[in-house]
C-alpha cells in the first residue's frame, strides 16, 4: 500500500524545469561559481522535499536550447522557471524570449515563471501551483 502511495505522489507531483546559465558562463564571476552551485544544489533538494519534481538545467545563447527542448519534448513539464542570470540581465532578453518561445511551442500548458533574486523560488512556484508538502 505504501509503495502505491509513493507512486501516486510521484505521478501527481508538479514538474518544474529551472533553466539558467551554465556556471562556467563568462557572465558568472569565477569567484561566485562554487557558491552558486551550492545554492542551486540546496534549492533542488528543498524543492524536491517540498513535493515538486524539480530539475535544474543549464543553457546559454552560445550553447543553444537543444537540451532544454529535448527535456520539454520527453518529460512532463508543468512549469518553467527562468533563472536570475537570464532574467536579471538586459543582454539576455533575446535568449529569455527564445526560452519562452520554446516553452510555448513544446509545453504549451506550462506556466512560465521568472526568478529575479527578490523572492524565494518556492514562493514563486507556489503562487502558481500551491504548496505541496514539507
Image (cartoon, rainbow, N blue to C red):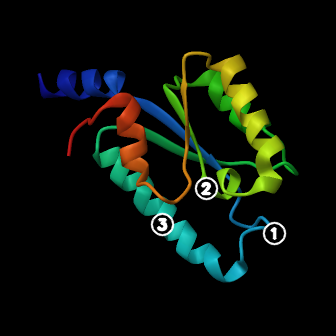
Q: Which residue lies under the disc numbered 3?
A: 39
133 left or right of 121? left
C-alpha span from label 3 to label 2: 13 Å
Question: In percent of the image, x 71 and y 79: which residue is there?
Answer: 30
Give SS at disc 2: helix
39 and 127: which is toward the camera: 127
**Dot 2 or dot 1, earlier in sequence:** 1
Q: Position of residue 79 (x, y in %)?
A: 51, 30
Which quarter of the figure has residue 10? top left
Question: In percent of the image, x 20 and y 46: which residue is there?
Answer: 134
Question: In percent of the image, x 48 and y 59: which residue is there?
Answer: 118
Crowding at label 1, few (<14), some or many (≥20) Cα neighbours within 10 Å? few
**Dot 3 or dot 1, earlier in sequence:** 1
- 30 lies above or below 21: below
Q: Which residue lies under the disc numbered 1?
A: 26
Q: Position of residue 95 (x, y in %)?
A: 80, 43
**Dot 3 or dot 2, earlier in sequence:** 3
70 left or right of 78? right
Question: In percent of the image, x 51 and y 43: which residue is there?
Answer: 55
C-alpha span from label 3 to label 1: 19 Å
Disc on res. 84? 2
| 3 vs 2, front mark | 2
Amino acid at each position: 500500500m505504501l509503495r502505491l502511495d509513493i507512486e501516486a505522489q510521484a505521478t501527481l507531483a508538479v514538474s518544474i524545469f529551472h533553466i539558467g546559465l551554465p556556471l562556467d558562463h563568462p557572465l558568472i564571476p569565477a569567484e561566485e561559481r562554487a557558491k552558486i552551485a551550492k545554492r542551486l544544489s540546496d534549492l533542488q533538494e528543498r524543492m524536491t522535499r517540498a513535493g515538486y519534481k524539480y530539475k535544474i538545467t543549464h543553457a546559454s545563447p552560445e550553447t543553444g536550447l537543444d537540451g532544454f527542448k529535448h527535456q520539454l519534448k520527453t518529460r512532463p513539464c508543468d512549469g518553467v522557471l527562468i533563472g536570475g542570470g537570464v532574467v536579471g540581465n538586459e543582454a539576455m532578453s533575446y535568449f529569455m524570449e527564445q526560452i519562452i518561445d520554446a516553452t510555448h511551442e513544446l509545453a504549451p500548458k506550462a506556466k512560465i515563471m521568472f526568478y529575479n533574486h527578490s523572492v524565494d523560488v518556492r514562493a514563486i512556484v507556489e503562487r502558481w501551483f500551491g504548496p505541496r508538502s514539507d
